[in-house]
Image: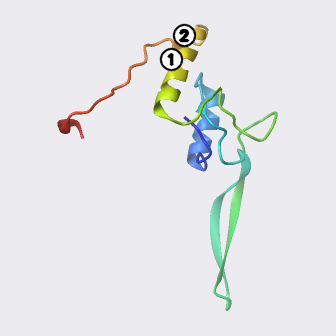
């Protein structure tokens, strides 16, 4: 699941899941540009009480196309809509064997499990 609050390490994970596996991204477009500068550092400016924050490394997670990560299955982020989208997608795409396994969701928890 991805969405507008997906950024930093979660954005990196989403980009790498898409490029290195058969993962299906469900939700909304992520909230950060995947090709950007990261790894922040800080430097105090003498005699000013100002701290300068800057990025030290540029990353390119999207090699071609627009600088964005959109979901494979656009959905508003709720558990019911997301799980239904995954189930529907898994039954439509038999060529992606990783999605053919049964999907089970636990709908209740006992006090001993929390």
Instruction: Please tell me whether mark 2 sits on a helix, a strand or a loop.
Output: helix
In contact (CB < 8 Å): disc 1 and disc 2: yes
Q: Kindly identify the residue that appears in the image at 21 percent across and 34 percent down.
A: 110
Q: Kindly identify the residue that appears in the image at 55 percent across and 15 percent down.
A: 88
State the residue in front, 98 or 68. 68
* Residue 63 in the figure: left or right of residue 49: right
How many residues crowd mark 1 within 10 Å: few (<14), some (14–19), many (20+)? Answer: some
Q: How many marks?
A: 2
- Picture colour scheme: rainbow
Q: Is residue 28 above or below residue 51?
A: above
Task: Kindly give the residue lying farthest to the left in the view shown.
Answer: 112
Residue 86 position in % (x across, y down): 53, 21
Residue 103 found in image quarter: top left
State the residue in front, 43 or 97. 97
- Residue highlighted by disc 1: 87
How many residues crowd mark 2 within 10 Å: few (<14), some (14–19), many (20+)? Answer: few
Residue 98 position in % (x across, y down): 52, 16
State the residue in front, 14 or 111. 111
Q: Is residue 94 above or below residue 77?
A: above
* Residue 60 in the figure: left or right of residue 83: right
Instruction: Please tell me whether mark 1 sits on a helix, a strand or a loop.
Output: helix
C-alpha separation, residue under disc 1 versus residue under disc 2: 6 Å
- Residue 91 has which mark? 2
Q: Kindly identify the residue that appears in the image at 54 percent across and 10 percent down.
A: 91
Locate the C terminus by quadrant.
top left
Residue 55 position in % (x across, y down): 69, 62
């Amino acid at each position: 699941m991805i969405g507008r609050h997906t950024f930093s390490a979660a954005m990196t994970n989403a980009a790498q899941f898409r490029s290195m596996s058969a993962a299906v991204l469900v939700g909304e477009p992520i909230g950060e540009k995947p090709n950007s500068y990261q790894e922040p550092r800080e430097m105090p400016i003498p005699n000013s009480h100002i701290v300068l924050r800057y990025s030290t490394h540029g990353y390119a997670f999207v090699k071609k196309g627009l600088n964005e990560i959109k979901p494979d299955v656009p959905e508003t982020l709720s558990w019911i809509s997301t799980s239904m989208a995954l189930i529907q997608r898994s039954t439509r795409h038999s060529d992606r064997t990783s999605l053919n396994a049964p999907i089970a969701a636990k709908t209740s928890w006992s006090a001993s499990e929390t």
